[in-house]
Image (cartoon, rainbow, N blue to C red):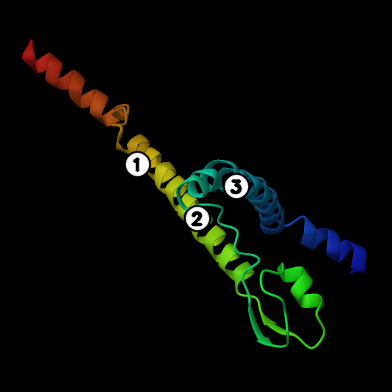
Amino acid sequence: MSFIKEFKQFAMKGNVVDLAVGVIIGAAFGKIVDSVVKDLIMPIVSAIIGQPDFSNLYLVLKGDVAKGLPLEDARKVTDAVIFAYGSFLTVLLNFILLAFIIFLMVKAINSMRTKEEAKPAAPPAPTATEKLLMEIRDSLKK
């Protein structure tokens, strides 16, 4: 089998197409969740605790760096060893908020699913045997 045919067969398998659709939907959903966190949640957090941007927090382990210098400028100082923990804290806080928002969204979707599943289904149509038995019952009642 030629390489092109083999690749085409691989690419057209259902799992690969499903994965591609999942990745595209996931990317779009990621943008929605990112917007929810950035545009809706973070302003509320900022109003409560102040601007949660810790990216300029760092410790100077070695070297002479002026206090209050932004992280990027402090990194430019030669012979300075900098422990930049602020960026990690910012990413960690964003991750925790993002995970919490996704949890709430999944919980809401699951509760909607259980409500739909809890609705009583229409009784199934009677089978031919059941119809015959109902006719016999009705004729005996007469």
**Is residue 87 left or right of 139 when viewed as pictured?**
right
Q: Which residue is mark 3?
A: 38
Residue 97 circle label? 2
Tag 3–tag 2 contact (CB < 8 Å): no
Q: Nearer the viewer, residue 12 or 108?
A: 108
Of residue 60 and residue 53, the one placed in the foreground of this image is 60
Q: Amino acid at mark 1?
A: Thr
Helix, strand or loop at disc 1?
helix
| Front residue (pair 99, 108) | 99
Instruction: Specify the amino acid type for callout 2.
Output: Leu
Query: In the rendered structure, which amino acid carries the disc numbered 3?
Result: Lys
**Residue in the picture at 73% in, 88% down:** 63
Upstream in the sequence, badge 3 or badge 1?
3
> Is 42 situated above or below 10?
above
Residue 114 circle label? 1
Please state the horizontal and vertical placement of residue 100, each as a whole percent of the image. 46, 54
Q: Name, please, the residue furthest toward the front.
A: 66
